[in-house]
Structure formats: C-alpha cells, structure tokens
Amino acid sequence: MEEIKLTLNTAPVGQKGLGLWLQSLRVGQIFRMTVADKAPSGVLLLKVGGHQITATADVPVHKGTVLTLEVTSLGPAVSLKIVNPSVQGAVPANPLDGYLKLLVPSQGRVVEPLLTLIDPAQNANILSLLGMTKDEIDRIYRILSKSDLLADPGSLKRAVQQSGLFLEPRLLSLLGGSGILPAGDLKAALMKLLSRVNQILSQSQRDRGTDPHRGVLLNLQEELEGALATITLKQLAAWQVDERGGCVWTFDIPIRVQDAVHTAFLRVERENTTSDEDQEQQDWKVLLSVNLPKLGAIDAELYMRGTRVSVVIYAEKIEIAKLMNRSRHQLQSGLESQGLNVSVLRCHQGSSGEGKLGGQWGECVDVEA
C-alpha cells in the first residue's frame, strides 16, 4: 500500500481545532477524507471532519475521490496508508459505505464519557437526570482495569476481551445456542447508557436553548456516540484481512489510576499466515502505549515468532528508563514463565515514534538463534 504524508494547512479559516484533532490521532485509526482539490505540483487538499489538510501522495489521486485512510505513523510527520481497493476515482459502493460516512466524523475518545461520569462536578446531576443510582455508575467504573494489574497476563487478557471489540461475535454465538453474554463488556455498557440517555432526551419537551439540564445530557450523548463510533470503526478495520491472512487489531483500553481514568493503546498485527501448517512461522507485532502521571509516556514494542519474543521499551523520562533497565530481569522472568524464549530485551530513553512498528523490527530480532 502507498502512503500519504500529511502536513499542516497554513490557511487560518476553519483551522481553529486542527491542532487538537491532529494530537488526538492514534496509530490504527481509520478515516474517510475527500480530495477537495489537487494542485499542478501534486499537492492535495483533503477535507475531514470540517478541517482542511494538505498532503502529498506517490499514487495518482483525482479531485473528488473519497479516500479510506489508516494512520500508520505519528512522527515526525503523520502518515496515512490508503486502504481503498482503488484510488482511481470514487470509492466503490459497498453495504457499509453509508454507515462509515456516519461513523467517521463522529469519532471520539473512548475514555471521554467515563471521565464525565466520574467527574464530581457533574456526577450527581447526571445520576439525577438519568434516574440512576451510584451503584449503576460504579458498575461501569468497575469494568475498567487498574493500571497495576495490566502487568498480569490474565488481567491484560480480560481488559482486551472487555474492550468492546468482540461484542458482536459474542452476541452472534449466542444466537445459535444457549448462554449468557459475559458481564463487563465496555461497548455493551456504553450502548446501554446511550439508550438510557436517548430515552430521557426523547421524553423531554423542554426548550433546548434555555434548559441547562438538557445540555448536560446532550454533551454526554455526543461523548457516548463518539466512543461507540471509535470502537465500531476499530471492529470494522479488524475485519480487513489481506491475501496472506494478515490482520490488525487496535484497542483503546480505559485504565484506572487511583480515582482518574487514562487510556492504554494496544495494536496487535499478525502477518505471514498462509496456512494452518505455518503456525510456528507466524509473525506477531505488538505496540502498547500509555501515558500515566509520574511515569510519563511509555511505549513497548514486541515481536514474536513461535515462542521466540523480542521486546524494546521506550520511556519518555530518563529516570523511568533507568528504573526499567534495572528491572529488566523481572520482565524477562515473567515472559519465560509463560513459556516464551526471550531473544532481545532492551529499554531506551525517548519515544518509539511509532514509525518503527512498520520498518525497524529487524533490530529486535536475534537472527543468529
């Protein structure tokens, strides 16, 4: 696939929120952008979510083309991979086309409605408006994993399973037989809450311009819809399997740090899956990224083939990088206790840049083994 390199449009009109939008981008996100214009030099003017962005591409792209793009790198320049079946004109019609057009501009942070629910300044008011008890909100809050438990394989696995990405397959499996949907699915919890909000809003006959209570619910409704749109787009992106069986899963996992909520970003990529006989030759790539108080930003890159695993960790703060280097043997012991053979384990101060995910995995592999 070819890539488009995005650069900031200097035009001031309509660009007020562009910086915040660019900062919200995450590797693996899917977007629809329309080619609004094309200069003789080949520079493209793209429209997305009310913003205008200039870009260059190494493939011919015509004015009016609707591009489906996946974020592949955030630095030093934002890179987007074209995932359209063809970019020689309009995107071919498909059953999901209209659905995607509704989802893409609605994307929001998965953690946003959770922050609103636990905000002491709004919590009591929201509970009163929705007719909910504090126990019902606490039940949603308990879905979130605690940060200190993510080092445990079982806890991390549960956090991934409850991220909402697997809700529909679980529901589908229940149609063919008996069973109960496991409690704790984040998407299911958000959908139930959104249904409650929509019901209250539909019953309200008050004037929306003067009623401050309606504004609170409308804000929560927008946050819930944005979170659900993001989860759904990640689900749709995971269904895209290439001819070799390669697939990518991206997760936003809300985590609890004391009384606050933060997000862990997890990207899992599977390659080289040509048949059932190639299980030991499958390549797995994983990026785990978190930004926590006191610790700062931490990225962990993992490469695995069979039972061989290589890990490179990047810590933004030098003191955290030194601490991790002193504790590397504990991580190695933990990996080996799961039956893995650790080829490389390193910790660096700085940032992975997330671009290494696609181009420098070779430095993590012990080719002599």
Image: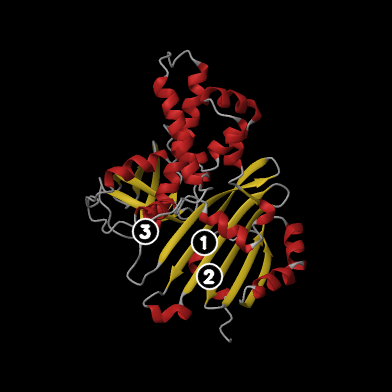
Furthest residue toward bottom: 368
The answer to whether mark 3 and mark 1 are in CB contact below 8 A is no
Disc 3 marks a residue whose amino acid type is Trp
SS label for mark 3: loop
Mark 1, residues whose alpha carbon is within 10 Å: few (<14), some, or many (≥20)? some
**In this rendering, position of residue 300 left or right of residue 16:** right
Q: Residue at x 54, y 73 (%)?
A: 304
Marks 2 and 1, the one that precedes in the sequence? 1
Q: Is residue 279 visible?
A: yes
Q: How far, Cα to Cα, is label 2 from label 1?
A: 8 Å
Which residue lies under the disc numbered 1?
Answer: 355
Q: How far, Cα to Cα, is label 2 from label 3?
A: 26 Å
The answer to whether mark 2 and mark 1 are in CB contact below 8 A is yes
- Dividing the picture into quadrants, the one containing residue 52 is top left
SS label for mark 1: loop
For the residues carrying marks 2 and 3, which lies nearer the camera in this image? 3
Disc 2 marks a residue whose amino acid type is Gln
On residue 319, the disc is none
Q: Position of residue 230 (x, y in %)?
A: 44, 45
Q: Is residue 118 above or below residue 248?
A: above
Marks 3 and 1, the one that precedes in the sequence? 3
Which residue lies under the disc numbered 2?
Answer: 360
Disc 1 marks a residue whose amino acid type is Gly
Mark 3, residues whose alpha carbon is within 10 Å: few (<14), some, or many (≥20)? few
Mark 2, residues whose alpha carbon is within 10 Å: few (<14), some, or many (≥20)? few
